[in-house]
Image: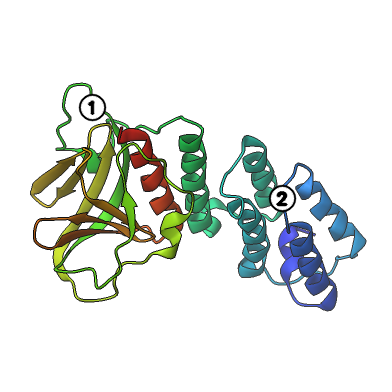
Amino acid sequence: MGIKDLFGKGKKKADFREAAKEVLTGKLTPGKAAELESLRREHDVEDAGDDKTMLRRDVYNKAVGSVRARGKLSDAEAAELAKIQKFLALRDDQVERTKWDLVRLRTLTEIRQGRLPVVPASNAAGRGVSLAPGETAHYGVQVEVLDRPTTSGLDGVTVKWATPYVINSAKGHSLPADGYKELGEGYLFITSKRLIFKGAGKTAAVEYAPQANFFLYSDGIRLERTVGNTILKFKSKSDDTAEIVGELLAALMR
């Protein structure tokens, strides 16, 4: 019997799924994949059933959720998640969004440990972006560009010069839902010296400085102008993107 058969119909299989999610609640420690195999035997799940990808993915996402709740991903946790994915017979494309979340979480973990990522020179999105001597591109994210005259009281988290980022502080702030003028889309690059936006046929940049007016939200970053605001809304739809941007700017703006 294949692991996929554990996720068909029947009370035994339903009981196994619930027990598996219970095992994966809390900190993900080495040996969780082995515990799942023990549960399979304990619940005597032998009847063949349908290949329920959604149900297997639900168990995998429970394990990932335990890691995400801690806000970091260790090497041991990454290895155990790989074992659990293999046990559940889930292909990478069946948990693609979750895998991307883990990539962002790993990036965030490394930044907090003082290891800043570097955008490869071969990155297609970065073609046409000219870096100054000694400047390094550390991160890139696809964004929508919006113009808004005011914030309607939703100011976001101020990104201050030489000030640490408070973990999860951006998660409680969302961009205003409407009142925008759409200006297109492109990529935002966070470099060692400035924010660079690359759009269709145009590039703009803002250097880091004590007087720079940046404001972070869970879903984007606001650049305050003399009149009005430029909004760069993240297209990733992940809270970890704001955390990465916040931690990087805190490390670089000094």
Residue 238 in sight here: no
SS class of the residue under badge 2? loop
Q: Is residue 102 left or right of residue 212?
A: right
* Quarter placement of the N terminus: bottom right
Q: Nearer the viewer, residue 69 or 131?
A: 69
| Cα gap from disc 1 to disc 2, whole angstroms | 39 Å
Q: Position of residue 219 (x, y in %)?
A: 35, 61
**Numbered badge on residue 135:** 1
Is residue 227 depicted above or below 196 in this figure?
below
Kind of residue at badge 1? Glu
**Which residue type does callout 2 highlight?**
Lys
Q: Is residue 172 above or below residue 195?
A: below
Please tell me how crowded label 1 is: few (under 14), some (14-19), or many (20+) other residues with Cα within 10 Å: few
- Give the image quarter of residue 49: bottom right
| Extreme-top residue of the structure | 134
- The foreground one among 231 and 161 is 161
**Residue position for label 2:** 27
Q: Position of residue 233 (x, y in %)?
A: 28, 60
Secondary-structure class at tag 1: loop
Q: How many marks?
A: 2
Q: Is residue 253 left or right of residue 231?
A: right
Percent position (x, y) of residue 134? 22, 22
Look at the picture and state if 8 lies above or below 168: below
> Which tag, 1 or 2, sits closer to the chain's start?
2
**Residue name at image x 30 percent, y 36 percent:** 253
**Residue at 36% of width from left, 66% of height from top?**
174
Q: Quadrant of the C terminus?
A: top left
Q: Is residue 197 visible?
A: yes
Residue positioned 49% across, 37% down in the render: 112
